[in-house]
Image (cartoon, grey):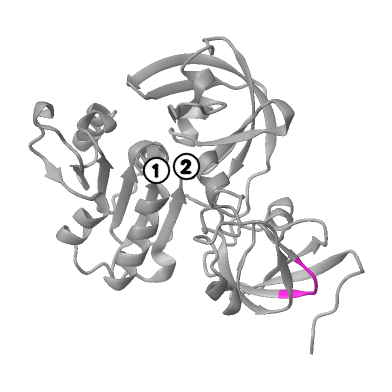
Amino acid sequence: MPLTATDASSFHVTIEPSQRSYTASKDETLLAGAIRQGINLPYGCKDGACGSCKCQKVSGTVTHGPHQAKALSDDDEAQGMVLTCCATATSDVVLESRQVTAQGAYSIKKLPTRLKLMEKKSDDVMRLLLQLPANEPFPFHAGQYVEFLLKDGVRRSYSIANAPHLLAAGEGMELHIRHMPGGLFTDQVFGSMKERDILRIEGPYGSFYLREDSNKPIILLASGTGFAPLKALLEHMQFKGITRPVTLYWGGRRPADLYMTDWVSAQLAKMPNLRFVPVVSDGLPEDGWRGRTGFVHLAVLQDVPDLSGCQVYACGAPIVVASAQRDYLLAGLPVDEFYADAFTSEADKAANTL
């Protein structure tokens, strides 16, 4: 028997197999309705660029707004796949999304922050520490991100690079910003921005966080500043006493792109179950690099050709994340054990939006 809309302006959305449900208005995306009501659907960019929110439509009808073909192809749509971040319901809808959990999402907050510290970690990576209001708690899951609220409604998203307990202890919110020449926000970070500036953020966002109900070995895959949320995951694991085997694969074009290897080395002494595999793809003779070379996601397969018993958390450039997902599923990784956060630039979005 078909579901009935609650009224002409909103529709029922049911998630299988969890059977969680909520209502979505005809003027909001399926994802926006879920976030508003504390339903933990998977998502990343919220802009139709990364594909993290893609799931199967079991029944009902939706209309998609602008999105990138790599996130949802015509074939995907013909097979009933939807991007919840840019799909609006036109009837009651049933979705299949196996990453939905009963864990409640944290409330989204808008906060002023003061820029406490700017520390250049390489020629094109800046580490920021933001001081949040002392009387305003900001709970979040390690691995989630915040959005900077800029002029004229413009937003820019960055992963939180430290764990919640460190933020709660007053250390500030850590972010790793890579300079994109011509970028509206990153040109400011590497140009006019200075310590003690006031910035506005909103969050937490994202479904990239550690699934603690598993005991499977963990593979952390990072390219460039995709290391930031994985750093937060490692800090969280230490704090919670989680001793699952974990291997961090971190790739960059040049050794300088691996901008906090000293921090990782220090964690190896604290976490006996942690391994670190740095990988450089375009090292030059003057770099003196003697470590692993090639594509970082392939280094994982060289070491672990059968991924059927693992969990993977991948973060960084979209090409790395997409290649990893494709190849790891072929290597036996269960589809619901791949968690990703692809860093898609505004230039990429503009070039690829349909």
Q: Residue at coordinates 39% horizontally, 43% vertically from top-left?
A: 233
x%, y% of residue 295?
A: 23, 50
Image quarter where the C terminus lies is bottom right
Residue 55 drawn above or below residue 37? below
Outermost residue, right side: 8
- Which residue corresponds to mark 2? 142
The circle drawn on residue 233 is: 1
Would you say the residues marked 1 and 2 are in contact, meaning their CB atoms lie under 8 Å apart? yes
Asked whether residue 215 is in view, the answer is no
Q: Is residue 23 left or right of residue 95?
A: right
**Of callouts 1 and 2, which one flags the residue occurring earlier in the amino acid sequence?**
2
Q: Quadrant of the N terminus?
A: bottom right
Q: Within 10 angstroms of label 1, few (less than 14), some, or many (20 or more) residues?
A: many
Please identify the quarter of the rendering in which residue 15 is found: bottom right
Confirm whether residue 202 shows in the render: yes
In percent of width and height, residue 305 lies at: 19, 66
For residue 90: magenta?
yes
Span highlighted in magenta in the image: 89-93
Helix, strand or loop status at disc 1: helix
> Which residue occupies the foreground of this view, 149 or 105?
149
